[in-house]
Image (spheres, grey):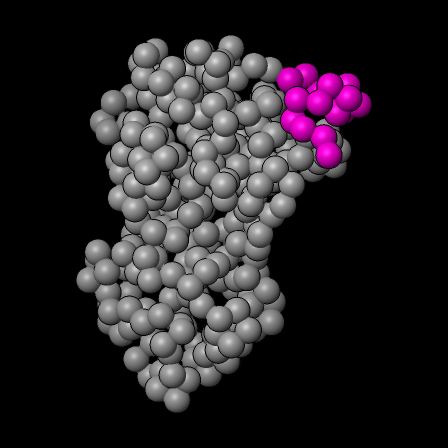
Amino acid sequence: MHSISDPQILKSSSMKITDFKSIVKNYEIIFFDAYGVLKNSFGLIDGIRNTFKYLKEEGIDFYILTNDASRGPTKLAQVYNNNGLHEITPDKIISSGMLAREYLNLKVKNGTVAYLGKNSSEEYLQKIGLKTLSVSDLDLSDVDDISVLVFMDDEGFDWNHDINKIVNLLRMKNIPSVVANTDWFYPVNNNDIAIAIGGIANMVEAITNRRFIRFGKPDSNMFIFAYEHCAKGRKIDKRKILMVGDTLYTDIMGGNKFGIDTALVLTGTTLPNKAKKRINSTGIIPDYICHSAAIDI
């Protein structure tokens, strides 16, 4: 098994690897992806605590741009706090679930929102006073009040039973479907991935021949929302913002489309020995490639 620092991988890929510390000091705001950049299923990526100490010392602002709609910003921040990363507070979290909530607040006037995901996902919906029902508790013989279906998270339900249930719900009722996380998969560790709710939504969309409404990276709305969130009335030069991610199709393409610099890290879904091939085949080119977002101080 090769590690990220294996010189044979770097030599064979012919990629120019840049030290993260050497580039981050040139920016005023850093947008970090979460999974694969700051953490994985085992906890924080090695050295990440040092990164946030450095950002604080240098006065560099940051935000976490995540397609995670499994829980609200307070609970997402708490995960980092529990791991000793206290610099990440709820106001630093910008998630796709926040965009989905904004849409639902404007568009859903009555009825019940059926959601696929953990009970913690319900926080986004309850904050705007919507009546909610987990798909796990949905009775297909009583769906008259269901006005919208929301894909929130890949856990908290029976994959076989409940996915079949939502397929039949969409066959029975012509209701809008909202995908609050566009990720197809996410990194579990340096080698393995797991299917995310965006991948499940793609499958259901194909089966039902529907067109779903999606929120999250790489959609520009996510970056516009983040830019407005961090600007708060002040003018920010987009050339002073850096997007750091582990996935070409979401983090890097989204940042490139929005017109900000991007840094690909090799601690998540883009494996070091596959990075050059993926970049060449997709044409999605980051401004920088780094081993990780960790900083030695």
Q: Nearer the viewer, residue 7 or 248?
A: 7
Left or right, 75 with respect to 69, comes to left
- Magenta-span inclusion, residue 54: no
113 lies left or right of 18 = left
Question: Which corner quadrant holds the C terminus?
Answer: top left
- 57 vs 282: above or below: above
> Residue pushed farthest right?
12
Going 41% across and 19% down the picture, which residue do you hit?
Answer: 50
- Please report the residue visible at 40 percent of the width from the left and 72 percent of the height from the top: 135
- Location of residue 32 (image quadrant): top left
**Quadrant in the picture for residue 229:** top left
Q: In this rendering, would 22 be left or right of 123? A: right
**Is 13 situated above or below 74?**
above
Disc tally is 0
Residue in the image at 27% along x and 34% along y: 89
Can the viewer see residue 178 in this picture? no
249, 52: nearer the viewer: 52
**Chain part drawn in magenta:** 1-17
Where residue 176 sits in the image (x, y, percent)? Answer: 41, 68
- Indicate whether 293 appears above or below 171: above
Q: Position of residue 82 (x, y in %)?
A: 32, 38
State the residue in front, 193 or 274.
193
Q: Is residue 172 visible?
A: yes
Give the percent coordinates (x, y) of residue 214: 46, 54
